Amino acid sequence: MLAPGLFVWNDFVNVPEDAQEVEAIGQQWHWTYRFPGEDGEFGTVDARLLSDDNPFGMDPDDPRGRDDVLVDSNIVRLPVDKPVKLLLRSKDVLHNFTVAQFRVKMDLVPGLVSYLWFTPTRTGEFEVLCEELCGIGHHTMRGKVEVTEVDEFDSWLAEQATYEELVNTPDGDPEAGQQLYAVCSSCHGAQGQGNKNMNAPKLAGQEAWYMRRQLEYYRDGIRGAHEDDTYGQQMAAMVSTLQSDKAMRDVIAYIETFPDEPVASTISGNEQRGRQIYQVCGACHGWDGQGIQAVKAPRQAGMQDWYLVRQLENFKQGIRGSHPDDMYGHQMMQMASILSDEQAVKDVVAYINTLPQNGNSQLAMKRSEEQ
């Protein structure tokens, strides 16, 4: 068994010279990807440079990285019949990159760059799994590889942003956003305070990155496509008024100028039971419900409880999160399944209502230590 195994291992570790290099980055609990730019070389990365503004850890002083293509998504495309060398890097703990149909897998070890190679032989969509126990969200750490014809892959890659383009993207203009927000204010309120009668949640105080993702989901038909998501369908129609990326940046910049006023509680439940349930939620959304951008989990504390209840019910029923490209929605669908009944939903939301609405970091640390 050892002798033939060594021949197979030799093929596994010796990469064809014409293989295209792609970097896959794993972290709790999602995947991102990086392609070399026109120079064919990757820029330097450093774990010490990782931040919300630099999630790939790019070295801004390395000119080789300026044209690197950064795919901040769980979904990546690869060309068919072309060998690929996948460089594997972890930002936190042990992970394992696995696509069952590729018949190869490899661990991602913090501090090292491992690799594997394969040649996709047919087009299609294939699920990426993490097969190394990496934390409470391990089972939801899913991604997707779309294998396409070469021309289609080249077109897709050309549409992706480079590091230089992302760094030079201008900030949103609040003044321009004020005019665009006139349409939004009829439901969400002049100061983004939300309006239950219009089924419009509070926007003030929510993170810009999360609002951007939701607007893009509505624009691309990822959210609001389910036949039972009546309010999502309304939002999808309204988002069509934002006809460019700049328009989205501008309207979000204007929303960020709104005061983050406290909201009243309208949901009652067993807060102690809700606290026990929230131990699962806190791993992503923060022990203080403040949201953690690194794990793509939005703020919960200070948001309107009636809206949280509705979204949890939507996730449980598959009304939200069931679109094949909504990878984070799939995560929430699986996590929401721990809420066994309507009372459990109310209990956890009642506990969220007790969290400080201004994101008290000291209290969050204390809660973390208690957990």
Image (cartoon, grey):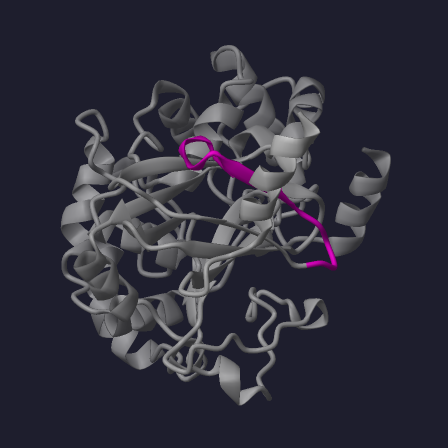
Identify the image quadrant of the C terminus.
Answer: top right
In the drawing, does residue 257 fall left or right of residue 176?
Answer: right
Closest to the observer: 115 or 309?
115
Residue lying at the far front in this picture: please name it. Answer: 3
How many dots with numbers? Answer: 0
Identify the image quadrant of the N terminus.
Answer: top right
Q: Is residue 270 above or below residue 55?
A: above
Q: Is residue 43 above or below residue 13?
A: below
In the drawing, does residue 252 fall left or right of residue 271?
Answer: left
Residue lying at the far top in this picture: please name it. Answer: 341
Magenta residues span 96-112
Corner quadrant of residue 231 = top left
Closest to the observer: 36 or 331?
36
Residue 156: x and y, percent?
25, 61
Who's the residue at 51% across and 84% down the image?
64
Q: Is residue 160 above or below residue 172?
A: above
Closest to the observer: 290 or 209?
209
The magenta stretch spans residue 119: no
Who's the residue at 70% across and 41% down the image?
287
Residue 304: x and y, percent?
46, 40
The magenta stretch spans residue 106: yes
Corner quadrant of residue 46 = bottom right
Who's the residue at 80% across and 53% down the image?
362
